[in-house]
Amino acid sequence: MHLTVEDVMKLPLLQTSDLVTGQEVLGARQVEWVSVIEGAVEDFVRDNELILTMGMDCENQPDKLFSFVREVYESGASALGIAVGRYIFDIPDSVIDFARHNRFIIMVIPWEIRFSDIQRAVMAELNAWQEDVANRSRRIQKRLIDLVVQGKALSDIVQYAERSLGWRIVFVDKNEKIIPDIDRAYRLADLWAERQSVDEDAILEPVSQHIEQTYHDEQHLLKKSISAGGVNQGSFIIMLPKGVRATGNVLHILEYLSAAAALWKSREDAIVHTENRLRNDFIWNLAKTPGYLTDHIHTRAKILGYNLYLPYVCIVGFLENVDELSEARYDDPQYGLESLIFYMEEEIRYACGIVSKQATFTFDDDVLIIFFEAEDEGIHGSVHYFLDLVEKRMNALIPGVVFSWGIGKHEDGIMVFHNSYQKARAALDMGRRQKGKGERVHYEDTQLNRLMLTLAGHEDIQDIMFKTVAPLIRHDRDRGADLIETFNVYMSQNSNVSRSARILNLHRQSLLYRLRKIESLTGLSLVNPDDVFLLQFSVKVWQTGVLSDKLPDS
């Protein structure tokens, strides 16, 4: 509510005053100040100001009085009070016609009423109104905080504010979710989007730069951005009733509403953080702790929303280039590593919904551990489609991000989380060592590598391997050559020199030179099947990577 001209006219002091024009808008014209002006109006009048005048410069000059009234009207005054009986005795018809045409309020005040008394009475009413508004604002602020503390939903908080203020309010979160989830809220959000597309928004400076404004059907339409922890969380869209402007009182209440929303978001984040920590600990223990399957594990899983009676395949992912991403970007709270993990979790949930599979996941340092539902025969296709979705959406968020993946064995069955994790982690490690970054490796595809890893643990095998390939390793390291890769390509092409040369982008003679160099360094012949087998075996054992720090000096 605001103090209106109608309220002013009801003051005992003005009971002998007469209303000349504007009867139909008395209750709609707000009064925020009262001033006395004689002569030039210029820039002295503010919006919603009650102007008092004796008309001393307009005595016997109807045209000058008309100009004065017009200037007062054009300055945005809410009403004009003219003292009659000394300089002005009657209001000219031209002035009355102008005021009626423009629905401008003119009242005549008996000469005997002092303007100072009117100013004192109006200011007393304004002060009382301001105090009432302040008390009401404090009550609303307290109630908003109480609702947050009581754990009420944000939709309840928004609807309370609507009822208390008589405004239309909707909250749009950073994911474009509309709160409350009702038709009129969607209509208001659509209206803002429509107005924004055809109208340039002005920023309201008095309280906050985060308030945008546009208009619809003579009503103020506002958008107030909300942030918590330095991160944008969404915005309020508010339509004020007709006649209500975005004044300081309105903006202060907006700040209270924003603070309540930010507090609610912080509280929700704390709850979600606690729930996520419990879930992460649970999944971490399933993956990393042998024998974690206790009698109460199904009860705990049900509380956390997991169904352990389904078969799962473990997927282990590693974010390869997080350190290479822009440091300036990740210094921003919106793009910090914790936020990156949050976004990854969101994308994993989204991908699960698309493929209609259940998944549980957690982070262990830089490693992402996912248990993905493996109930159907086409699990390989589902896993790759799922990972394609995750990578695509993460690349849209962070261009250039690279993941390496290890995928466990899906036939293991139910309640084999630790074993499945070990297989997925082994597949990831072997894939990164032998195929490089950004690859996906299934545990089923690592049989030969696992055999090589087992053999690499025997000292006799190590001695044979190093005697065979150590000369090649040192030559590649010291000369910047690539004899081992040359040998691998040559073997993959069934010892075909021409095809191998094309793949290596070498002249035929250059390739032959390299092959002779391999023979001279190893003392083996590439036309002797036993020598070729020994060299291939030794190279594969070396390329497991587990003996890279044991290379003899000479």
Image: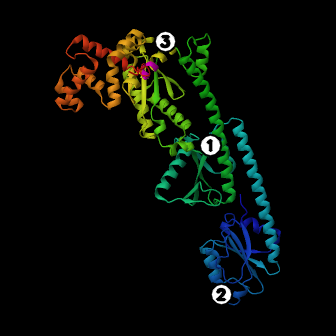
Q: Residues within 10 Å of mark 1 (few under 14, many from 20)?
A: few
Residue 223 is inside the magenta segment = no
Magenta range is 425-429
Q: For the residue labelled by badge 3, is the local secondary structure a helix, a strand or a loop?
A: loop
Q: How crowded is mark 3: few (under 14 residues within 10 Å), some or many (20 or more)?
A: some
* Residue that label 3 marks: 414
- The residue indicated by pointer 1 is 229
Query: For residue 182, what is the image quadrant?
Result: top right
- Tell me residue 403's x, y (percent): 43, 31
Residue at 57%, 10% (x, y): give it.
Answer: 291
Tell me the CA gap for discs 2 and 1: 63 Å
**Separation of marks 3 and 1 at Cα, in angstroms:** 41 Å
Question: Which label's residue is closer to the chain start, 3 or 2?
Answer: 2
Against 338, residue 307 (above or below) is above
Please report whichever mark, 2 or 1, sits nearer to the chain's N-terminal start. 2
Seen in the picture, residue 344 relative to 20 is either above or below; the reply is above
In screen coordinates, is 276 left or right of 379? right
